[in-house]
Image (cartoon, helix red, strand yellow):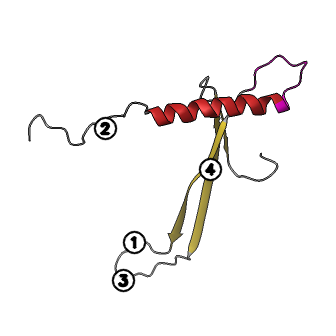
């Protein structure tokens, strides 16, 4: 198997006509909606951001350990929960992104 790749290379297909039309329709709908919310005095453009959140962490169930033979270990059962929360918003048009990485998530954090 010399010269062969372990994993095949994925080919990203070109945009289809249907997806191009749906993007054009999205742009038209956003332009129409933005007129409803835009302040006439404000000249800044309206940017569309997509948001996602994730929770990373671990849950360990610690209940056993190694001890020399002939001895008995004193280990209590313990649940360890540690999490980190990540929130990100991305503007697909400009590529701008903003992220928050927080130790916990509640209304005060957000």
Residue at 44% from the left image edge and 82% from the top image edge: 72
Q: Which mark is residue 70?
A: 3
On the image, the x and y values in percent for residue 61 come to 52, 70
**Left or right placement of residue 54 versus residue 15 in this view:** right
> What label does residue 84 carry, if any?
4
Marks 4, 3: nearer the viewer: 4
Q: Report the magenta residues as a range.
A: 36-46
Please give the residue where the numbered disc 2 appears in the rendered image.
10
Q: Which residue is mark 1?
A: 66
Asked if disc 4 and disc 2 are in contact, CB closer than 8 Å, the reply is no
Q: Residue at x 58, y 70 (%)?
A: 79
Is 79 in front, or is 98? 98
Vertical order, 58 against 67 (above or below): above
Tag 3 secondary structure: loop
Type of secondary structure dominating the magenta stretch: loop
Q: Nearer the viewer, mark 4 or mark 1?
A: 4
Q: CA distance from mark 4 to mark 3?
A: 41 Å
């Amino acid at each position: 198997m010399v010269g062969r790749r372990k994993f095949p290379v994925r080919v990203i297909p070109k945009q289809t006509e249907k997806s191009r039309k749906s993007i054009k329709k999205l742009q038209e709908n956003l332009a129409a909606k933005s007129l409803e919310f835009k302040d006439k005095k404000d000249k800044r453009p309206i940017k569309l951001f997509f948001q996602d959140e994730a929770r990373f962490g671990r849950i360990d169930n610690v209940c056993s350990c190694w001890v020399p033979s002939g001895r008995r270990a004193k280990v209590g059962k313990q649940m360890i929960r540690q999490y980190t929360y990540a929130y990100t918003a991305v503007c697909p048009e400009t590529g701008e992104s903003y992220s928050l990485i927080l130790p916990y998530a509640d209304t005060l954090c957000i």
